[in-house]
């Protein structure tokens, strides 16, 4: 027994020692003086590219963007020559559990899923952990803003949009409680065959009952006056007043149609489709109802065995070509893979999209869909100075190398656990004598 205790104690000390080294970088100090980046290739985010560009910002706000020939005044600025490097707007990651989940199988680090089917009153904001070690790993690829979303049940609660550098969730907030998340009940579900042991698709026998639960909730919420106090009904009022969005999570074409018709029948004005694997099959409905899509299947397998192997890669191009406003999300991928958001856009660029249009899907389009395009998503005067510098194409994992980043003009520290491990083992093996 004593030996067991000693072993456990030793493991705890070793874990603590490693954790002490793997410290999340401290948030950056506020911008102290005007800054000018010169000589850059500026990707504005709206499709425009400026060669030999100049971008200036002060007190966290962009003051000017243009080329060297425009004669932008840089006197009184800290001038940083980034000749030949690329400057991009900070990427915007929708529908992520970043900051809510650290290690999936350790319950104390998992604050994503609430029990029950109806959790409208849940707020991701108050659970957001600014000390997550996954945040530095995510922003190292240029992702500087994220919509943090709860999961669980049919109504999972309200998401919030955060800047990925702050001491606490209050300081990180860009927009709180931006919308409710509805996971439409599936017509079919997976069930393990007791004879073969394999999973198979079967009819969801609970579908009608689940839809009736949603009807009862929306009926009550639509006429709720505030008395008696009901937190779930109170949390849904923005959907009917037009101040909040309904993020409808659905992939199957029939489920998309059912979810949209359901929401419209209760007067929900702002709907965003999340997932959208079969969105092209219902494009006429999405166009008629002016519903944008956050597509999340770029690096997924084809839905059916007869589909082209590159069908998911081409979907953003097809949706945009059809006239649908589309952004790219990462919520369908594992949390650790969501930092690959720029490379999802790169895949879309390799399958039909113009490269700057593909960049727009993870910058301005996502910002516009989430309702924060007045602050982030493009490099324009008056917007937040949230941007990053790369010596290669940020959408190409072979050349992307982020050298620095700013969030509201703050020069953030990109050195995190992943970089520490890389440096440690690079030194180890580079000094190895054969």
Image: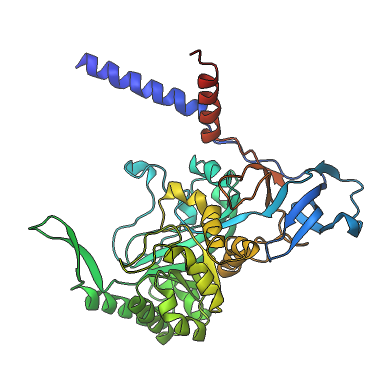
Q: From the top left corner, tell me how far across and down residue 321 is, in percent.
A: 55, 76
Report whether 74 appears left or right of 375.
Answer: right
Q: Nearer the viewer, residue 204 or 21?
A: 204
Figure check: 263 above or below 400 = below
Q: Is residue 317 visible?
A: yes
Q: From the top left corner, tell me how far across and down residue 354 is, in percent.
A: 62, 65
Report whether 392 appears left or right of 1.
Answer: right
Q: Is residue 161 visible?
A: no
Q: Quadrant of residue 379?
A: bottom right
Q: Nearer the viewer, residue 426 or 238?
A: 426
Report whether 49 appears left or right of 225.
Answer: right
Residue at horizontal 34 percent and vertical 66 percent from the top: 303
Residue at horizontal 51 percent and vertical 29 percent from the top: 421
Q: Quadrant of residue 376?
A: bottom right
Residue at horizontal 31 percent and vertical 67 percent from the top: 304
Q: Nearer the viewer, residue 356 or 413?
A: 356
């Amino acid at each position: 027994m004593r030996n067991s205790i000693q072993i456990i104690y030793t493991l705890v000390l070793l874990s603590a020692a490693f954790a002490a080294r793997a410290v999340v970088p401290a948030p950056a100090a506020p911008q102290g003086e005007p800054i000018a980046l010169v000589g850059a290739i500026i990707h504005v985010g709206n499709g425009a590219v400026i060669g030999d560009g100049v971008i200036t910002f002060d007190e966290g706000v962009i003051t000017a963007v243009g080329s060297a020939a425009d004669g932008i005044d840089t006197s009184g600025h800290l001038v940083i020559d980034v000749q030949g490097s690329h400057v991009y707007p900070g990427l915007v990651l929708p529908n992520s559990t970043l900051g809510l989940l650290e290690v999936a199988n350790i319950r104390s680090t998992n604050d994503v899923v609430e029990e029950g089917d109806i959790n409208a009153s849940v707020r991701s904001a108050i659970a957001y952990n600014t000390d997550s070690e996954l945040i530095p790993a995510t922003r190292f690829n240029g992702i500087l803003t994220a919509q943090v979303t709860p999961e669980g049940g049919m109504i999972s609660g309200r998401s919030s949009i955060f800047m990925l550098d702050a001491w606490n969730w209050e300081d990180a907030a860009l927009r709180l409680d931006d919308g409710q998340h509805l996971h439409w009940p599936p017509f079919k579900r997976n069930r393990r065959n007791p004879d073969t042991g394999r999973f198979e698709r079967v009819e969801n026998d609970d579908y009608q009952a689940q839809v009736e639960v949603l009807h009862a909730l929306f009926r009550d919420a639509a006429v709720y006056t505030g008395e008696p106090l009901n937190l779930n009904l109170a949390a849904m009022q923005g959907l009917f007043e037009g101040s909040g969005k309904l993020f409808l999570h659905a992939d199957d074409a029939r489920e998309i149609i059912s979810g949209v018709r359901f929401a419209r029948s209760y007067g929900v004005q702002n709907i965003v489709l999340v997932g959208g694997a079969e969105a092209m099959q219902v494009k006429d409905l999405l166009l008629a109802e002016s519903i944008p899509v956050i597509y999340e299947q770029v690096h997924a397998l084809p839905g059916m065995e007869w589909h082209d192997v590159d069908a998911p890669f081409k979907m953003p191009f097809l949706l945009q070509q059809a006239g649908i406003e589309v952004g790219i999300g990462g919520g369908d991928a594992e949390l650790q893979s969501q930092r690959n958001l720029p490379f999802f856009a790169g895949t879309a660029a390799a399958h039909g999209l113009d490269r700057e249009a593909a960049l727009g899907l993870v910058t301005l389009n996502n910002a516009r869909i989430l309702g924060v395009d007045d602050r982030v998503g493009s490099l324009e005067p008056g917007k937040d100075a949230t941007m990053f510098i790369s010596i290669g194409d940020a959408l190409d994992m072979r050349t992307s190398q982020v050298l620095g980043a700013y969030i509201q003009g703050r020069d953030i520290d990109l050195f995190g656990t992943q970089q520490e491990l890389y440096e440690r083992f690079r030194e180890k093996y580079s000094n190895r004598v054969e």
